[in-house]
Amino acid sequence: MNMITENILEVEQIPSVYESNNVDLRFVSKDLVNGLKIIHKDTSYIVGNLALSEGISPHKNINGSPDDLDYKILLKSGLLLGYHKIGNPMTLTTGFPFSTFQLYKDQAREMLVGEHDLEFDTATFSSGGKKKIVAEVDNAYVMPEAVSCALALRKQGAAKGSFFMISLGYGTFEAILSTEGGLVQRSSVSTYGLRYAIKLLEAELSKIYYLDLKNEHQLDTAFRNSFIFLNRKRVDLTELKRKVLRQYFEDVVSPALRKAFDDNDFAKSNTMYLAGGGALYTELFECFQKEFEDILDIKVPEDAPYLAAKGYCFNSLISNGGDKGRAIGLDIGNSTTVICTFKVES
């Protein structure tokens, strides 16, 4: 007997990268998550960790539309992993930044609802070959990422009343004032994400080193690790990383927040939550603390990188009448794609 564990969410994540690959790859990964090879329109694509290990130059567009190939490949990957977690049918919620939400929400929902023919190659992690399944999405919903982060905090009991919600994503930085009645639309802001800082880092490094055609994901990984190997030497990026993150905050984040929030907003709440991958950077956290010293209590939830996906999953649960076994949240991020479901115990 399978039993859904009350309010315990599970997440799986893959790097949001892919590359076409028609090589016969066998036993190169340990499981499906690490061995994703999707067949789309008769072309094979390696996705996520497999693309990083077997690819030449894996890539992804930034803030792509539902029509873009990268979105379709990552969507199929997310649906495949979701199917193997909860089966059919699924109630699915995903989202976009405020900057593209209105533009893509109807198109995305229309694309999501219905049956999805998924073809994939299992030879990457087993003795099998190509397989086909049909993933059924009975209902689909699309919401802004920052709103989803706030929903996750409320549903998990981490936040109540009014609070400021900040989403520090790779492609987009977002901020809202969330209240019990919903977001304050006037306060919503969407602008450049952490990619801005990584481009600053790239420009600084290129003054000294030949970057050997490093792609964007490699630079993102080096940025997170605070080091990079160049010309067979390990280069410490700690101080340069601190410098560009401070510059990013001063040039992008701080001006956007000053424009979005006024004194009346600060009178409604004294707490700000940071979510997204950028919330894990101590250098950025310190910038927020300095900016709002004596005004706001800055908090980073334990599950900050997965809050959007968890909020999507909670929205699916609310929308399908409380059936945890069918609820799924899918965050197709610019850096990482996260699949969230309720935990199932045997």
Image (tube, rainbow, N blue to C red):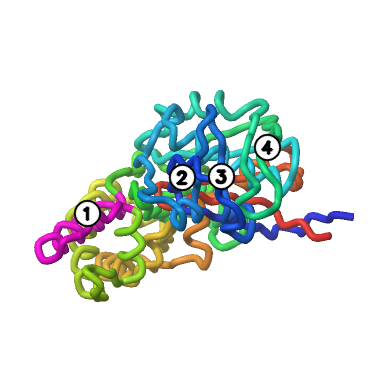
The answer to which image quadrant residue 222 occupies is bottom left
**Of residues 99 and 74, the one drawn nearer to the viewer in this rendering:** 74
Work out how far the residue at label 4 is from the one at label 3, CA to CA, in angstroms.
24 Å
Work out how far the residue at label 1 is from the one at label 2, CA to CA, in angstroms.
23 Å
Dot 4: within a 10 Å radius of its alpha carbon, few (fewer than 14), some, or many (20 or more) residues?
many
**Helix or strand or loop: what does disc 3 sit on?**
strand
Please give the range of residues in magenta: 193-216
Q: Marks 3 and 4: in contact by CB < 8 Å?
A: no
- Mark 4, mark 1: which one is toward the viewer? 1
Work out how far the residue at label 4 is from the one at label 2, CA to CA, in angstroms.
18 Å
**Of residues 109 and 185, the one drawn nearer to the viewer in this rendering:** 109
- Mark 1, mark 3: which one is toward the viewer? 3
The residue where tag 3 is placed is 37
Residue under the image location 38 percent in, 35 percent down: 64
Furthest residue in direction right, as rendered? 1
The answer to which image quadrant residue 344 occupies is bottom right
**Helix or strand or loop: what does disc 2 sit on?**
helix
Q: Position of residue 320 (x, y in %)?
A: 71, 37
